[in-house]
Image: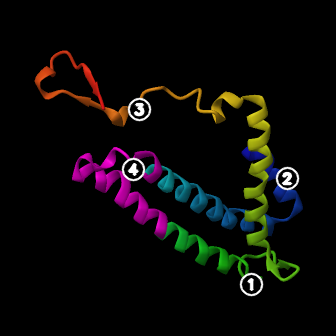
Amino acid sequence: MTLVIYSTLSLISESIVKDSIHSVSIAICTYYTVAALSCVLYFHRTAFNHWHTTLSQVILPAIAAVILIAVGILQVWNMMDPSYGSSGSIAGVGTVFLIGVVALFFGVPLMILWNIRDPRFFRGETLPLERAHMILDSPEDSTTRTPNIR
């Protein structure tokens, strides 16, 4: 698939290939922001059992999300400038920004199609019923490893 995308973009223009590579940072920043916020939301109920889990499952991911949101906004602001990248602009907006946003919004119909194809995933039915972070080992029963669910 990468070869097809690269070949198609190369046939159009070499500068579009460069701008497409620059625009990937929008998707990467969005992905890691969503992942950090998901971690905070997923673990917030059980993370306060110990300071270490609080730090690693809530505080640090929340700080990362705030930093990534700030970096993402700054990067998007820079990409909107027509002088950023090598393809110029369309209607006064930088091509790098447009490529990044169009690629990101192209994922929405793909998610809708995937939801039609396999709705069980979006209802959470493909995930295990138990949460690994909620299973605590009992210290007095370390030989049998019987889970103690809270």
Q: Upstream in the sequence, badge 1 or badge 2?
A: 2
State the SS at label 4.
loop
Tag 3: amino acid: Arg
At label 2, which amino acid type do we have?
Thr
Of the image marks 1 and 4, the number of the one nearer the N terminus:
4
Residue at (53, 56) in percent of width and height: 32
- Dot 1: few (<14), some (14–19), or many (≥20) neighbours within 10 Å? some
Tell me how far mark 2 sits from mark 4, CA to CA. 45 Å
Circle 3 packing at 10 Å, graded few (<14), some (14-19), many (20+), is few
The residue range painted magenta reads 40-66
| Residue 8: mark in rendering | 2
Q: Amino acid at mark 1?
A: Ser
Q: CA distance from mark 1 to mark 4?
A: 43 Å
Instruction: Say the numbered circle drawn on residue 131.
Output: 3
Question: On the picture, is 14 further left or further right than 147?
Answer: right
Question: Hey, which residue is sitting farthest front in the picture?
Answer: 150
Q: Is residue 64 magenta?
A: yes
User: Which residue was labeled with disc 1?
Assistant: 83
Mark 1: secondary structure:
loop
| Residue 17 seen in the current view | no
| Disc assigned to residue 29 | none
Q: Is residue 70 magenta?
A: no
Q: Is residue 99 above or below residue 58?
A: below
From the image, state whether disc 3 or disc 1 is nearer to you: 3
